[in-house]
Amino acid sequence: IDKDVSETTKVQHFTVTDVETHIRLYKYDIETKAPLREAEYLIFNETTNQEVGRYKTNDEGIIDLYKLAGGNSYYAQEVTAPNGYKINDTKFYFDIDANGFVKISDKNSDKSVFTINDKGDMTVSLSNKLRWFKLNVVKKNDADKLLAGAEFTLYKNADCTDEVTKGITDD
């Protein structure tokens, strides 16, 4: 702070406020848009070549990061996907300038996942897809004998209104 106080005998008071950086990672299901908990992210400081920490999303699919050091470049990378989901190991890059202001890094190929509000807080909205699996349906009678020709329907939702596929068991 530069201020010429040579011509005054009054005591000068200044309030200096540091900008507190706030980065929010929001994790959600790509199809249902529902928040996903227990996704673990690595936050890495590229400037110092050091891991900042590993954080897990809460029940609302959120990780809030505060007070990351300014003058550095960082990335967030998923290291553990939520149960049943495919990992999204893309690195999402952001910079914090010397004054504590957040900026989307030019290293990102997709900048649409980033938003910065009027207060300078950044949100990174990250999606996951369900991991594909193989489902075997085995229909048996009370004598433990395989039943051929049993029909079944697999639904996407608990209300059994969104059909995925139908099938018939074989021998």
Image (spheres, grey):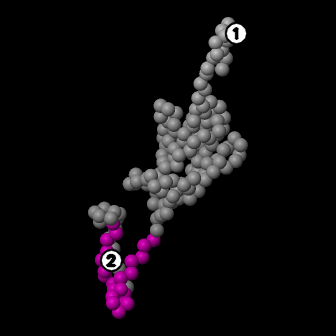
- The image position of residue 69, as x and y in percent, is 65, 39
- Dot 1, crowdedness within 10 Å: few (<14), some or many (≥20)? few
Q: Amino acid at mark 2?
A: Ile
**On the rendered structure, is 9 left or right of 154?**
right
- The image position of residue 17, as x and y in percent, is 59, 29
Q: Is residue 63 visible?
A: yes
Give me the residue at 65% from left, 31% from top: 98
Indicate the quadrant containing the N terminus: top left, top right, bottom left or bottom right.
Answer: top right
The residue lying toward the viewer, choosing from 30 and 116, is 116
**On the rendered structure, is 93 left or right of 130?**
right
Magenta range: 134-155
Farthest-out residue, bottom = 143
Q: Which mark is residue 6?
A: 1
Q: Which mark is residue 168?
A: 2
Element assignment for label 1? loop
Give me the residue at 52% from left, 49% from top: 63
Q: Amino acid at mark 1?
A: Ser
- The image position of residue 122, as x and y in percent, is 52, 39
